[in-house]
């Protein structure tokens, strides 16, 4: 049974470890603290019954141009996939972006070859591909830069997501 | 003619051309034109040899260039050349700070401040160090002064308020924030609504901490429109309602918030508590409640499942509290679609249910029934259609994990069935590896996990799992090789740099544990001390946020970060590493010859590494020296104590902490501390180990009683008599 809740500063160390165990794109603790201090409302974690972090979304706001949200990193441990965790993490983060920061849209990058992620973003969450960023990833792979408009998210704090 | 260095040249006040040059040095430094800054500085030094302020600027530039040794050396000379130069002291403080020597830095900034008490930059630098060192009293005084000199800067108000708060002066902190608001500064267009919202939340956090929950609630409610972080606001309302005994209101809020996120277990727990269905320290994972309570919960959650059909949590809470046939039906309902859809994580999603023999029996009955149905006519109970071949496959996979959890050898039977049926599913090999690991067959487990990894090289999860299993099987070299696939290669001869840079603590500890099993104490210690370095880095990391958080006005989040930092040695894996470290240093103390033990395995496993010509020998030597160096320490107990004190402070609820504490303190002849540790350990129950410790203490203290202070001796004697 997995609980999905907002990330607190106490979760940062575990989030870092989950990230290291899931993705090749990693960050030092200071970067996690930077997110936690600047945009504490936007990151969420999935926690199992033993208190382990099995998934997270690390998100921020970008101030260049129109204020918009950005997904820095999203991962769910392989052992806990197909339980809808990633979708739920994303929905919570998107709601918070709109509510606290009045973000008009949210952006993210995804590997061209990542079919599972594309299904999640494009099909389940209605993100659109804006452009291809060539050799975006350190290993040279191209990325889809995707965006989702947040205008349909209501301002009711108790709305079902 | 060469100018001689004199007291005059060292302390001269520059004028004319030289003054302009000095300004240029500063400008170049600020623009990061380091070479230019040094060049101009050197020109000044020709005319004014040993000029303290110029040397200081040169040192500051070196510091930015990463020339740490030179910069420290030079800035010390600058101070020596002119003890009255606030510039020299300020720079020395900056250099110490960038080397994380906060105490020395504080000392220097303080001198600079005394020499130049109105310089805002010096004051800010000093204040930040004081905060880093948690010197709240001085910090508050200084923040007050900074505010007085520049009231237009909102950040100064916020930091002063926080200083008062951290000093425990809640009412003062609240007043300061009120004063800030009264200036009208927060109503300006420049202040974003989420910044203002954050400050309001922070103020009411302080009010709450005074214990006046009513005031905190009323305050928040009156400012509700201005608070944009609605989730935190309503969670806070619910929390305050509970504290004020207003359970109906709390219940309403929890119910509303469930709309937004029915997967948040804290909301469910809060709801059940507000309705007094559960009390005290309750876990929704623990079904041990009386039958009426269980039924109440099940009925409630029947409604929730209907209301939130996509919520797994609502279904699983209901399942957790169901019993008998109802439990079986609900479990079946939950499992059938998962098997049809071939979801590998099904077991993980419900393994919390395995509590108590009764539940396990029910689960097994359900599984057996499903198995029988599928074997008979390939249909699940109450289903019309025949199942695809994946259904029995994933039922078998579930059964393998089920039996593994119960330590039943059928686990292996079932997983082998799965692999035979469809050997292309990675998860089957991962689970089989887990089964072997549970049986203690680490080599076989590792081989299987390697098989899994090779089936999907693009998945880092498998890479990490396999690395972990390789280390458990003590295949250290292979583990490094596998790990290196994902660690960025910074230098071609050192792919493992990245493990340190990216703070991969789990790996460092796992590798250390492998070395410990292999008898390579020094190598284990090398990895473990890295863990301490990371945690010291985390403490360092907060420093830049002292200024940043104030500029960004995210004071509420920043405050929580400071609190987190205060307890950081109790978080993450530090405790695990520290326990190993203390044990190792105890071993070194007891047997200093440990370093001289021949390391045979080490040489066998070293692969020749590609290096630049001529460097090979040196780097090899360097690599081998760290473990040796650590093992040859003359002060093992000093090191042990440093880690131990953190364990005592942050992991005092663990028996291990007090066992280790006893061992360290008794060797240091600290009888009272040894006794305290003994007492704490005994609280967990007096077993053979504790008995031995008591005897050990008695024998060690016997001869020493006369040497001790009579009061102390008396305390010891009366305490130890308790154990007779």
Image (cartoon, coloured by chain):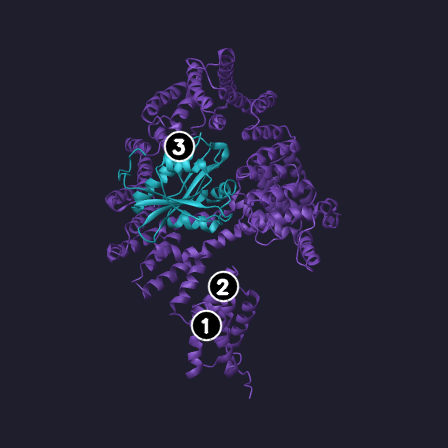
Chain colours: A cyan, B purple
Is the N terminus of chain B in the top left, top right, bottom left or bottom right quadrant? bottom right
Q: Residue at horizontal 37%, vertical 23%?
A: B297
Question: Mark 2 or 3, which is nearer the eye?
Answer: 3
Which residue was labeled with disc 1?
B87
- Judging from the image, mark 3 belongs to the subunit labelled B
**Can you tell which mark lies on residue B643?**
none
**Location of residue B278 with respect to B54 vertically, above or below:** above
Judge by depth and name the residue closer to the eye, B161 or A31. Answer: A31
Judge by depth and name the residue closer to the eye, B96 or B636. Answer: B96
Gap between marks 3 and 1 measured at Cα: 56 Å
Which residue was labeled with disc 3?
B265
- Left or right, B135 with respect to B486, comes to left
For label 1, the crowd category at 10 Å Cα-Cα, with few meaning under 14, some 14 to 19 and many 20 or more, is: many
Which residue was labeled with disc 2?
B105
Which type of secondary structure does the marked residue at label 2 adopt? helix
- Tell me whether marks 3 and 1 sit on the same chain: yes
Tally the marks.
3
Q: Quadrant of residue B240?
A: top left
Q: Residue at horizontal 61%, vertical 21%?
A: B409
Q: Residue at horizontal 42%, vertical 67%?
A: B122
In the image, residue A52 lies at what x, y percent?
49, 36
Gap between marks 2 and 3 measured at Cα: 46 Å
In the image, residue B427 lies at what x, y percent?
54, 30
Is the C terminus of chain B in the top left, top right, bottom left or bottom right quadrant? top right
**Location of residue B215 with respect to B315 vertically, above or below:** below
Can residue A106 be seen from the camera position used here? yes
Gap between marks 1 and 2 measured at Cα: 14 Å
- Judging from the image, mark 2 belongs to the subunit labelled B
């Amino acid at each position: 049974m997995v609980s999905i809740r907002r990330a607190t500063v106490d979760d940062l160390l575990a989030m870092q470890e989950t990230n290291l165990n899931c993705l090749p794109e990693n960050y030092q603790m200071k970067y996690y603290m930077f997110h936690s201090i600047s945009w504490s409302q936007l990151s969420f974690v999935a926690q199992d019954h033993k208190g382990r972090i099995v998934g997270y979304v690390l998100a921020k706001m970008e101030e260049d141009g129109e204020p918009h949200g950005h997904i820095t990193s999203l991962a769910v441990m392989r052992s806990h996939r197909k339980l809808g965790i990633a979708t739920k993490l994303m929905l919570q983060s998107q709601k918070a972006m709109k509510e606290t920061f009045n973000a008009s849209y949210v952006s993210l990058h995804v590997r061209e070859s990542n079919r599972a992620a594309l299904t999640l973003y494009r099909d389940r969450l209605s993100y659109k591909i804006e452009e291809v960023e060539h050799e975006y990833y350190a290993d040279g792979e191209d990325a889809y830069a995707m965006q989702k408009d947040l205008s349909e998210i209501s301002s009711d704090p108790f709305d079902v997501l | 003619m060469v100018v001689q260095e004199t007291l005059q040249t060292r302390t001269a006040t520059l004028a004319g051309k030289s003054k302009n040059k000095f300004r240029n040095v500063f400008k170049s430094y600020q623009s990061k034109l380091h070479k230019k800054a040094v060049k101009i500085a050197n020109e000044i030094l020709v005319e004014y040899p040993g000029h303290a302020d110029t040397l200081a600027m040169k040192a500051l530039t070196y510091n930015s260039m990463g020339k740490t040794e030179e910069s420290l050396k030079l800035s010390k000379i600058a101070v020596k050349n002119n003890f009255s130069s606030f510039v020299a002291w300020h720079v020395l403080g900056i250099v110490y700070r960038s080397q994380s020597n906060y105490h020395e830095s504080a000392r220097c900034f303080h001198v600079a401040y005394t020499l130049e008490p109105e310089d805002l930059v010096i004051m800010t630098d000093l204040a930040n160090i004081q905060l880093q060192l948690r010197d709240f009293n001085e910090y508050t005084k200084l923040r007050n002064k900074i505010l007085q000199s520049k009231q237009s800067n909102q950040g100064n108000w916020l930091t002063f308020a926080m200083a008062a708060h951290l000093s425990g002066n809640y009412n003062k902190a609240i007043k300061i924030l009120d004063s800030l608001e009264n200036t009208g500064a927060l109503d300006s267009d420049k202040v974003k609504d989420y910044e203002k919202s954050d400050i309001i939340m922070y103020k009411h956090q302080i009010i709450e901490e005074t214990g006046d929950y009513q005031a905190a609630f009323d305050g928040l409610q009156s400012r509700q429109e201005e608070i944009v972080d609605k989730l935190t606001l309503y969670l806070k309302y619910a929390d305050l309602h509970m504290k004020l005994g207003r359970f109906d209101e709390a219940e309403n809020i929890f119910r509303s918030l469930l709309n937004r996120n029915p997967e948040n277990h804290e909301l469910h727990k809060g709801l059940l508590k507000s309705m007094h269905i559960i009390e005290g320290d309750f876990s929704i994972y623990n079904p041990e409640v009386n039958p009426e309570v269980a039924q109440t919960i099940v009925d409630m959650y029947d409604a929730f499942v209907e209301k939130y059909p996509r919520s797994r949590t609502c279904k699983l809470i209901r399942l957790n509290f169901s019993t008998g046939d109802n439990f079986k039906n609900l479990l079946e309902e939950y499992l059938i679609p998962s098997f049809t859809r071939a979801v590998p994580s099904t077991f993980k999603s419900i393994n919390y249910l395995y509590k108590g023999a009764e539940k396990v029996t029910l689960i097994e009955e359900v599984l057996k029934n499903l198995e029988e149905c599928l074997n008979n006519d390939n249909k699940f109970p109450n289903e019309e259609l025949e199942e695809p071949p994946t259904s029995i496959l994933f039922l078998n996979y579930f059964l393998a994990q089920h039996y593994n959890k119960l330590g039943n050898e059928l686990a292996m039977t079932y997983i082998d069935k799965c692999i035979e049926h469809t050997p292309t599913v990675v998860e089957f090999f991962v689970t089989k590896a887990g089964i072997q690991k549970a049986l203690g067959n680490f080599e076989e487990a590792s081989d299987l996990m390697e098989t899994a990894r090779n089936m999907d090289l693009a998945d880092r999860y498998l890479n990490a799992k396999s690395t972990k299993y390789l280390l458990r099987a003590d295949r250290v070299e292979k583990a490094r090789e596998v790990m290196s696939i994902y660690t960025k290669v910074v230098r071609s001869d050192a792919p493992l740099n990245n493990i340190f840079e990216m703070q991969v603590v789990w790996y460092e500890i796992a590798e250390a544990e492998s070395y410990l099993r292999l008898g390579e104490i020094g190598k284990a210690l090398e990895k473990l001390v890295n863990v301490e370095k990371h945690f010291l880095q985390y403490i360092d990391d907060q420093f830049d946020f002292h200024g940043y958080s104030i500029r960004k006005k995210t004071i509420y989040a920043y405050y929580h970060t400071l609190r987190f930092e205060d307890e950081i040695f109790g978080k993450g894996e530090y405790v695990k590493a520290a326990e190993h470290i203390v044990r190792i240093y105890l071993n070194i103390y007891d047997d200093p010859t440990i370093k001289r033990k021949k390391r045979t395995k080490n040489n066998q496993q070293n692969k020749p590494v590609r290096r630049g010509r001529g460097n090979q020998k040196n780097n090899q030597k360097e690599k081998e020296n760290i473990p040796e160096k650590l093992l040859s320490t003359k002060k093992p107990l000093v090191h042990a104590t440093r880690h131990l004190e953190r364990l005592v402070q942050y992991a005092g609820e663990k028996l291990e902490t007090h066992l280790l504490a006893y061992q360290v303190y008794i060797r240091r002849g600290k009888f009272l501390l040894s006794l305290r540790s003994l007492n704490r350990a005994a609280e967990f129950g007096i077993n053979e180990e504790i008995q031995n410790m008591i005897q050990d203490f008695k024998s060690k203290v016997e001869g020493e009683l006369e040497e001790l202070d009579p009061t102390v001796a008396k305390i010891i004697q009366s305490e130890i008599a308790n154990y007779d």
